[in-house]
Amino acid sequence: MKKFIETIQNIFKIEELKKRIVYTVLLILVYRLGCFIVLPGIDATLLAGLQSSTQEGLVGLLNMFSGGAFGNASVFALGVMPHISASIVVQLLGMFVPYFRKLQMEGESGRKKINQLTRYLTILILAIQCPAYMAQVHNQIPGQAFVAVNELGWSNFTYNIVCTLILMAGSMFVMWLGERITDRGIGNGISLIIMIGIVARLPYALTAEFGEKFTTTNGGPLILVVELVALFLVFIAAIALVQAVRRVPVQYAKRIVGNRQYGGVRQYIPLKINAAGVMPIIFAQALMLFPLIFSRWDATRGLAATLGNYTGFWYNLIFGILVVIFTYFYTAVTVNPTMMAEDMKKNGGFIPGVKPGKKTVEYLDSIMSKVTLPGSIFLALIAILPAFARILGVTDAFASFYGGTSLLILVGVVLDTLQQIESYLLMRHYDGLMKTGRLSGRSGM
């Protein structure tokens, strides 16, 4: 404990790091404040219908990522999800469109151009999602909630146009906050904003869980302790999944330039077991909403009910299989063995025992296929853990922290932020946050 306190003191001794942390906290506070500012012209006391409709499925996922702003009809209702969707589309285009592939290889100038195109695509996606969100608001809350329409005499069309512009501006402002945090704060800004939205739900989930367990008579407090221990173990398993890598040795040839020798050292390529992150779970959750379409017809209503049961066997089996499939697909999209082999060859590197060129590509592709299998299965287990938690009596709000996107985002963002703070401490010759740990990215590992 004494060592931990000393480390915290060391953090605030570094002026640049202290300023970055304070700057990050202030921008996060601005974001959280905006999540509670309701769209103008809506009575905030009549939002119960909208809030109850944002608890399950993809809509519940959007509400979780926005920190509850989606269900509050906030000016930040759509949050950073349109920007993330645009980033995914641009990333996929880099695999199939030569122009985007060329931009990805142009370094800093290419990155700036890609970021600009991503912003334009974000605006296009917002132009589609904002009217759809307003239609959702109109369907879920009573007509008397729209004060601007009822009392000020606005037409529904005019009001929806104004709210659409406000929602677009709010989402772009949240994106700007994320970029400012990345540039002048600590950690990845967009990821931090999503994480803060998830963490904001934790106090309510814990309160609901405590309330339920302490009002039962069949060993409630003891069961609560067991649940907290299980949650701790799940977090450890998720950290192991995020941190696990397969290190591929790379030998660099010796080069003599003047009186100095360059190269001749052995380094490693860290191939992540879970290179796809949380994206396979998000894709699978979106796809699992399609069977609900069959609920419109009597003949297929039973099938829709079976596939729409979040704690049912068939739902979780299909969900787990989809996560495995999407893990392989997204890994193939994001990890390019051909580009890795070309970069190695340009820098005079080679894998011992493997010929440069095509053989290196085949070798890297083979390793990725092997390490992705256990990673995808482990990811599928984490994805369906909330369903097991619900079956065992955990409340829905608290069960979401036992797995799925919320758990992996929390673990991934926290570890990434710790790595950045660790690097600042080590540059100033202070002990890091994880002196005896195995935090990935720590020097000397």
Image: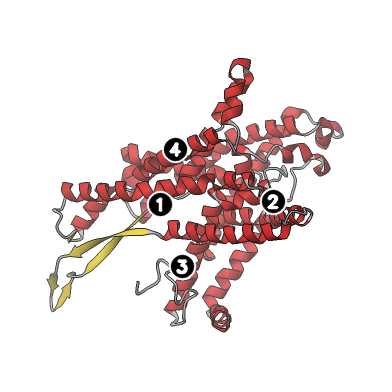
Q: How is the image coloured?
A: secondary structure
Mark 3, secondary structure of its residue: helix
**Residue 410 appears in the picture as rendered:** yes
**Residue 189 appears in the picture as rendered:** no
Q: Mark 4 points at which residue?
A: 321
Mark 4, secondary structure of its residue: helix
Mark 1, secondary structure of its residue: loop
Give how far apart the Cα atoms at labels 2 and 1 are.
32 Å
Q: Mark 1 points at which residue?
A: 274
Q: Mark 2 points at which residue?
A: 35
Q: Residue 206, percent across and down? A: 70, 57
Q: In this view, does 347 lie to the left or right of 75?
A: left
User: Which quadrant is the C terminus positioned in?
Assistant: bottom left
User: Which residue is painted at 73% across and 41% down in the image?
Assistant: 51
Q: Residue 158, percent across and down? A: 73, 31
Q: In this view, does 234 lie to the left or right of 296?
A: left
Nearer the N terminus, badge 1 or badge 3? 1
Nearer the N terminus, badge 4 or badge 1? 1
User: Which residue is painted at 48% across and 47% down in the image?
Assistant: 381
Give how far apart the Cα atoms at labels 4 and 2 are.
35 Å
Nearer the N terminus, badge 3 or badge 2? 2
Amino acid type assigned to the residue bearing label 2 in the image:
Cys
Q: Which of marks 4 and 2 is in front?
A: 4
Tag 2: Cα neighbours inside 10 Å, few (<14), some, or many (≥20)?
A: many
